[in-house]
Every structure is written in structure tokens, then in C-alpha cells.
Amino acid sequence: MKRLTFAAVCVAAAVLLTACGGGSPSGTGSAAPAAGADGLRSISVGVISIAPSAAVQMGIDEGIFAKHKLKVELQSGQGGAAMLPAVSTGTMNFSVGNPLSVLLAKNKGLDMKIVTGYSNSLATGEDINGVVAKANSGITSAKDLAGKKVAVNTINAQGDLTIKEVVSQQGGDPNAVQFLELPFQDMGAQLAQGNVDAVWVPEPFLSKLLADGNKLVTYNNQAALPGLPTMVTFTSGNYAQQNPEVVKDFKDAMTETLSMAQSNPDKVRALLPAFMKMPENVAKTLRLEKFDGAVDEPTLTKLGALMAKYKIVPSEPDVSGTILK
């Protein structure tokens, strides 16, 4: 995978900030990609370096994107929010990221479109992300997180939002939780050193921290919004308007890829040692999200309501208008 250069991200971020201030970027790089000698049209797709993203690599390896006349170049980023500027300006054609970031951008006037669903947390049983604390921390429930330092990978995103909701459900003060932003890979060390009281992590970090003797505080997604979509695919409204055939083919390829991933999770797990430099024995038993190309609009609407409740946005975002139909 290629990473976006620092300069490219900074330029794109400046455009995004202008858009959030009331402007609307026209976007660049929106011309329809021409087919190469192999008959394939090249597109760039941003992914986060977490286990579910390997499903896109599986779709590439299995020839699904080529079947739909697409040649995919993967680019990696810290999170969906970080890749929004690149998608907005056309530096990146599509991205996989959390839906809250897309809805937030749309609410601020940026024309983003959700193309497909991608992955969802599990509505029952052991979930694929959760809040973890030291066994001797005295934190026994989400309510106890009030007044504590809790690490999330991105502030004002789905992690802290659902944690606030669960704290509130249990009678605690959600505004008293002190959120800090850390990369997932650094959270275990910071928890061990006592620099944070709890961390919110996905797999494989969740299983590793629990195996190290820490304890689960809550499956916050499951408690707040069971089955909450963790990631979707998105593009800019400008790119979608100017490249309807490419977007349709991407949607079809992505839906087929995710169907295969859900039916054959071991194909995804087999890629993880190379894709994430994950130990093979860990990859073989890793719990994965539910993969689904369908967009769960009802649950995303509930997510939008929570965004307004906790003042991430001044009013509920236009979920229906954000979904490409």
C-alpha cells in the first residue's frame, strides 16, 4: 500500500477547512479514468491499517475488481477523517472509513457520498471493539469512566460518541470523560504505564489486551447502537457525478467482495500476516466484523441523532442525502 505524502494531505486539508468554513471545493482529478492496455481503469482507494481493510486486498487478489474492469491502488491513512480531504480534492478516488466522519463532513457542507456499506460491529455476543482497563483499576462499568482518561484513535468519532452514550445510559456524566487521541498500536503501552485509565480498541488489539490480564469494561458499540456500521466506502459528490460508470462498477465490485469476505472469513484472515504484519497464529483465530455492502440507513440515522445529542454537529445530519442511490 502507498501512503499519502505529507504535502498532499496538508494541501487537501486546507481545502477541506475552506469547505467547512462555508466554501465548496470543486475537486480535481475527477475526469473519468481511461482504460490501460489491460483494459482496466485505475482507481485509488484509501484504507485504514486495521484487519477488516484486508477484505479489499482479498477482492483485488481474487480478481473481483478486475472482473469489473478496475485496477485498484491501495493507499493507507490513520483514519477515515484523515482521508476525507484527499477524497474531496480528487487526490484519492474512494476511501473506506467510519461513517460518522463522512456524515460530519456532509453536515459541514462538504459534498461526500457513501457508496456502499463495508463492516458492522456485532449486535450480540463478543463484539469486535470495546473499552479495556487494568484489572486493578477499580473501573467496573462504563459509568466509572466519568472523570477518567480514556484513549480513542480519533476524538469526535464513533469511539468516544458511543462511549458517552453508554456512560449516560448507566447514569454517569458523559461530559466528565476525558478523551485522549492515540494510535491503536500505542494504547496498550500507555495503559500499562498508567498514562490513561482505559482504552478503546478494535481487534486484534482487544484480544491481546484481554489476554495480557486487562479487563473488558464495555462493548460500547453494542451497548449504544447494536450492529453499528464501523466502516463504509465513500467518494466525493463531484467524482460520483462525473464518473457514474466507474462508481457503479466500484459499488458492484465492493458488494461482491464483501459478500465473499463474509462467506469466507478465512480468506481475509490469511492475508493479515502480510497485510498488517500480524502473527499467523493470531490471524487464524481473529474475530472479524460482519461484512456487508448494504448501507444500514436506519442505524446510521440513529448515529446521526447521537451526533446531534452530544453536539458533534448542531443538527442531525442528512443521512439519506449522503447515501448514493
Image (cartoon, rainbow, N blue to C red):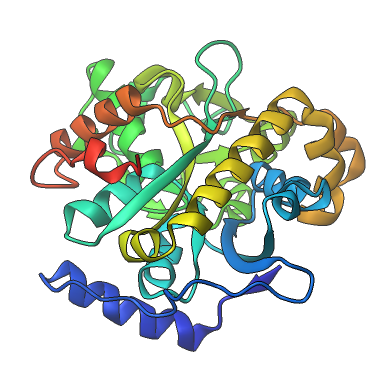
Name the residue located 38 percent from the left edge and 80 percent from the top edge: 28
| Relative depth, front residue between 70 and 3 | 70
Q: Is residue 168 left or right of residue 265?
A: left
Indicate whether 42 appears above or below 96: below
- Residue 241 placement (x, y as % from top left): 34, 60
Indicate whether 41 appears above or below 160: below
- Which residue in the rendered view is the most extreme toward the bottom? 7
Name the residue located 54 percent from the left edge and 33 percent from the top edge: 293
| Relative depth, front residue between 47 and 278 | 47
Indicate whether 290 appears above or below 49: above
Quarter holding the C terminus is: top left
- Residue 77 location, quadrant: bottom right
Report whether residue 72 is seen.
Answer: yes
- Which residue in the rendered view is the most extreme toward the top? 124
Indicate whether 207 appears above or below 61: above
Report whether residue 156 is seen.
Answer: no
- Residue 242 placement (x, y as % from top left): 37, 66
Quarter holding the N terminus is: bottom right
Name the residue located 62 percent from the left edge and 47 percent from the top edge: 188
| Relative depth, front residue between 132 and 116 | 116
- Residue 145 location, quadrant: top left
Name the residue located 19 percent from the left edge and 30 percent from the top edge: 305
Q: Is residue 247 left or right of residue 193?
A: left
Q: Is residue 302 left or right of residue 136?
A: left
- Residue 81 placement (x, y as % from top left): 40, 59
